[in-house]
């Protein structure tokens, strides 16, 4: 019979008390696992959001944080707008003049190359317009390039996929400019499917509804990004809605200084002309990411534009808002660890008065003091290991049970093992060690047991 | 085999004074000898057994077991000698309630340096008539059966000396003789010296050697007076 067997028998003898202690330990470990999983989910979610798939957000001068909140997270009050001409300045090569001809309207220097085009070669710029709502969700007016060219995920290498339908197009014979794509959460919450229509409200969720209806042509597969919580409509349709034309007048280029550009053939669809368009932001990705800094400087020297790096802004937000929460959660796990260890200490310590005779008998049979000390420590080790294992499986099991809900809300896929973090790999063994060490006090009581006094006759 | 010389043991009283409990000038047991130490309760019998077993440390004197002076050993050394050379049968059996009969016997083998022999534990239990009760816990055994398990446990390590402290005091008369016979027979077979402490004359009369505690313990009168 080895010492482990003796410790196991001792645990069995105090069956219910042992079970309660194991349960308490398991609860503690499960809580630690859950807290760490939540912490992982928050960090992972932010990490995904910080890799937005573009290098710069260009918007009107103002708060950089607000620009990011608006353009990436679709949060906060809408900011000022830029004229559509500013977006055209980012189009590489001769795309600017092509775009001007395609849309038509009045614009200064229609044949000139875009001011920032040189640094964009091979890259892309995507305009977004905000301001409308679909239910509680923000509406984003953009071009099909948003889903065709942007990538998301940790390495910004994941293409947007549609769980249903397709991306909207610039103009379709069936729906004209009025096609929409819903984020996964929007579709689930608003109970919409492909073929249904979307009517947006102006300015706020309770605001006045626009008359125009967009037909849903696609539902995004969950991405774990704020795009899951947004409704995307064709920017051309956005401009065609009431009150969406001409919010911006550029004093440097009054309309009379602009020239009328050639329009497309008469059978071309009727678009809102250039001088009546504005954008909230332009999402910019030069072909060479390192060129972003050469774009950022001149843009920030202009009077009306600012260029913001979303990664650095989001990292700043992570440090400012998420890091304290994460630290608080980690602090909580340490408290849980200590409480679990104390529960083992109390349980074994309370049993010591009942076990003095048994310890004395073992000593009378020749067990040395250090052997009985080891038996009690083994007992607390067994309780800690069993409780730890049960709690670990329970914690991850609960995570897996909630996987669907988490995926629906964050787009993150929670498996049994993928939420394991470096914290967990150190905290759980640390907790088991701590709980084992908690056995030292009762083990010392066992060590000091007076054999003669406790043996009886 | 066992030789005690000038053994003294006293306990501290609440008023700070010391009460002598044992004062044994000379006491010996030969190899495989079977003897009874008789005396009334409170005369220092158990204290003497505890000192011989190394459970209690005397104030002075010497206890030699197989030529090893226990009082010159460290506590861990005495523990090792006890595990290897001494079997102990208690009045209250002192079986561990969470362990089966077989495990209680095997427990006796766990703490000696010898390689545990599981088959010997089974054989001993069969020898004491509990071959069918190997996996019963003490609560499922009668008091007589419990004491038989305790006897098997005391024999587990093939000790050279078996100490039995009032082994029949808590047993019904029918089983008393059976326990004594069992202990004596096994000690005889395995050539183990036996020292039984009892206050029962009926038991004492069966042994070739009977020592009276009041004759070997010079502190006996004082102890009895203090009670």
Image: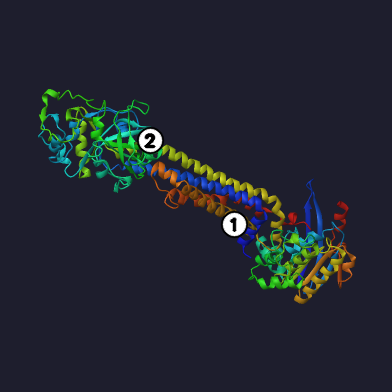
Subunit of label 2: A
Q: Position of residue A151 (x, y in %)?
A: 28, 45
Q: Is residue A416 left or right of residue A196?
A: right
Q: Nearer the viewer, residue A278 or A343?
A: A278
In the displayed structure, A4 sits above or below B19; it is below
In the displayed structure, A265 sits above or below A246; it is below
Q: Is residue A357 left or right of residue A182?
A: right
Answer yes or no: is residue A174 visible. Answer: yes
The residue wearing badge 2 is A320
The secondary structure type at the circle numbered 2 is helix
C-alpha separation, residue under disc 2 versus residue under disc 1: 44 Å
Q: Nearer the viewer, residue B23 or A201?
A: A201
Q: Residue at x 38, y 32 (%)?
A: A136
The residue wearing badge 1 is A378
For the N terminus of chain A, give its image quadrant.
Answer: bottom right
Q: Residues within 10 Å of mark 1 (few under 14, many from 20)?
A: many
């Amino acid at each position: 019979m080895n010492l482990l067997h003796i410790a196991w028998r001792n645990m069995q003898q105090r069956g219910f008390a042992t079970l309660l202690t194991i349960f308490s330990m398991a609860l503690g470990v499960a809580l630690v696992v859950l807290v760490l999983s939540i912490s992982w989910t928050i960090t992972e979610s932010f990490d995904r959001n910080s890799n937005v798939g573009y290098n710069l957000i260009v918007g009107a001068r103002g708060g950089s944080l607000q620009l990011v909140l608006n353009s990436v997270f679709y949060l906060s009050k809408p900011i000022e707008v830029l004229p559509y001409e500013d977006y055209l300045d980012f189009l590489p090569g001769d795309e600017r003049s092509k775009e001007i001809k395609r849309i038509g309207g009045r614009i200064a220097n229609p044949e000139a190359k875009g001011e920032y085009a040189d640094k964009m070669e091979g890259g892309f710029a995507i305009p977004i317009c905000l301001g409308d709502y679909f239910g509680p969700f923000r509406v984003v007016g953009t071009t099909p390039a948003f889903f065709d060219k942007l990538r998301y995920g940790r390495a910004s290498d994941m293409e947007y996929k549609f769980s249903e339908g397709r991306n909207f197009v610039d103009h379709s014979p069936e729906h004209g400019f009025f096609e929409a794509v819903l984020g996964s959460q929007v579709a689930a919450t608003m109970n919409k499917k492909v073929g249904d229509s979307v009517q947006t409200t102006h300015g706020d969720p309770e605001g006045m509804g626009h008359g125009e209806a967009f037909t849903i042509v696609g539902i995004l597969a969950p991405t774990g990004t704020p795009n899951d919580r947004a409704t995307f409509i064709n920017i051309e349709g956005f401009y065609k809605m009431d009150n969406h034309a001409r919010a911006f007048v550029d004093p440097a280029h009054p309309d009379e200084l602009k020239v009328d550009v050639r329009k497309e053939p008469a059978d071309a669809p009727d678009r809102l002309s250039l001088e009546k368009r504005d954008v909230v932001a332009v999402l910019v990705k030069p072909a060479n990411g390192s060129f972003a800094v050469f774009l950022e400087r001149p843009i920030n020297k202009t009077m009306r534009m600012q260029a913001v790096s979303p990664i650095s802004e989001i990292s700043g937000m992570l440090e400012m808002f998420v890091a304290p929460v994460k630290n608080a959660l980690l602090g909580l796990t340490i408290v849980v660890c200590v409480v679990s260890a104390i529960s083992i200490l109390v349980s074994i310590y309370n049993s010591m008065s009942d076990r003095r005779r048994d310890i004395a008998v073992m000593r009378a049979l020749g067990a040395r003091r250090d052997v009985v000390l080891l038996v009690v420590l083994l007992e607390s080790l067994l309780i800690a290991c069993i409780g730890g294992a049960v709690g670990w499986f329970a914690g991850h099991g609960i995570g897996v049970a909630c996987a669907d809900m988490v995926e629906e809300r964050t787009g993150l896929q929670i498996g049994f093992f993928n939420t394991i973090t470096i914290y967990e790999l150190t905290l759980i063994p640390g907790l088991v060690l701590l709980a084992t060490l908690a056995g030292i006090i009762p083990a010392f009581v066992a060590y000091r047991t007076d054999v003669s006094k406790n043996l009886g006759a | 085999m066992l030789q005690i010389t000038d053994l003294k043991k006293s306990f501290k009283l609440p008023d700070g004074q010391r009460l002598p409990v044992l004062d044994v000038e000379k006491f010996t047991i030969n190899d495989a000898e079977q003897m009874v130490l008789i005396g009334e309760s409170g005369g220092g019998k158990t204290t003497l057994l505890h000192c011989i077993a190394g459970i209690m440390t005397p104030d002075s004197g010497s206890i030699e077991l197989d030529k090893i002076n226990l009082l010159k050993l460290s506590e861990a050394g005495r523990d090792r000698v006890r595990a290897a050379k001494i079997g102990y049968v208690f009045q209250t059996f002192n079986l561990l309630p969470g362990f089966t009969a077989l495990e209680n016997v095997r427990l006796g083998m766990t703490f000696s340096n010898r390689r545990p022999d599981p088959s010997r534990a089974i054989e001993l239990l069969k020898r004491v008539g509990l071959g069918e009760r190997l996996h019963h816990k003490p609560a499922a055994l009668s008091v007589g059966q419990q004491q038989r398990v305790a006897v098997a446990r005391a024999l587990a390590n093939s000790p050279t000396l078996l100490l039995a402290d009032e082994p029949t005091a808590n047993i019904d008369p029918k089983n008393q003789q059976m326990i004594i016979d069992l202990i004596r027979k096994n000690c005889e077979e395995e050539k183990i010296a036996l020292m039984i402490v009892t206050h029962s004359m009926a038991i004492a009369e069966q042994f070739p050697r009977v020592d009276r505690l009041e004759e070997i313990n010079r502190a006996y009168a004082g102890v009895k007076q203090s009670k």
